[in-house]
Amino acid sequence: MDEDEDEQHEKAYINTQAELAALGVIVDWAVENNTKIYIFTDRKSSIYALKNHGTKSNFANPIKNKFRLAERLVGLTWVKTHAGIPGNELADQFTKLPTTNGSPTSILISETTVKGNFI
C-alpha cells in the first residue's frame, strides 16, 4: 500500500470505530428507555464487525454484546449511501461538519427532529 492508501485505510478504520461507539450509545439509550428502535447505516464495515462471529476486536465485541442483550429492542439495517433517504442524508451532512469548517462541532438537535427524520 502506498501512503494515500494507508491514510484512506486509517480514516475508514477510525470512521468505523466512531460509528460503532455511537451505535453502542444508541443501544444503551434504547435499553435504558425500554424503547424499540431501528438503526439504519450506510457503513457496511460496522454491520460486518457486529455480525461477524470471528470478530476479535476488543473495541467491537462489547458493542456486539450490547446488541445481543438488546436484540428485542434494537434492529440494525444497511441502507445504500446517497440514495436520497432523508435521515441518512442528514446524518451524512452532520458527519462532514467537523471536516468542512476545521473546528470541533457540537450539534444540538431536538427530539422532534430526530423522530421526524430518523424514526
Image (spheres, helix red, strand yellow):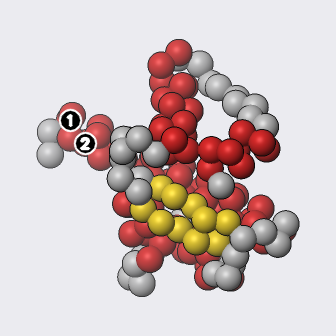
Q: Residue at image x 37%, y 60%? A: 44
Quadrant of residue 79 within the rendered picture: bottom left
Q: Evaluate if marks 2 and 1 touch, with contact meaning CB atoms under 8 Å apart.
A: yes
Residue at numbered disc 1: 3
Q: Quick check: 30 above or below 12?
A: below
Closer to us: 110 or 84: 84
Please give the label number shown on residue 108: none
- Neighbour tally class for label 2: few under 14, some 14-19, many 20 plus, Cα within 10 Å: few
Residue at numbered disc 2: 6
Question: Can residue 70 be seen in the rendering of this structure?
Answer: yes
The location of residue 32, given as percent across then percent down, is 84, 68
Quadrant of residue 51 within the rendered picture: bottom left
Separation (CA) of disc 2 from disc 1? 5 Å
45 left or right of 93 in image: left
The location of residue 80, given as percent across then percent down, is 35, 53
Q: In which quadrant is the C terminus drawn? A: bottom right
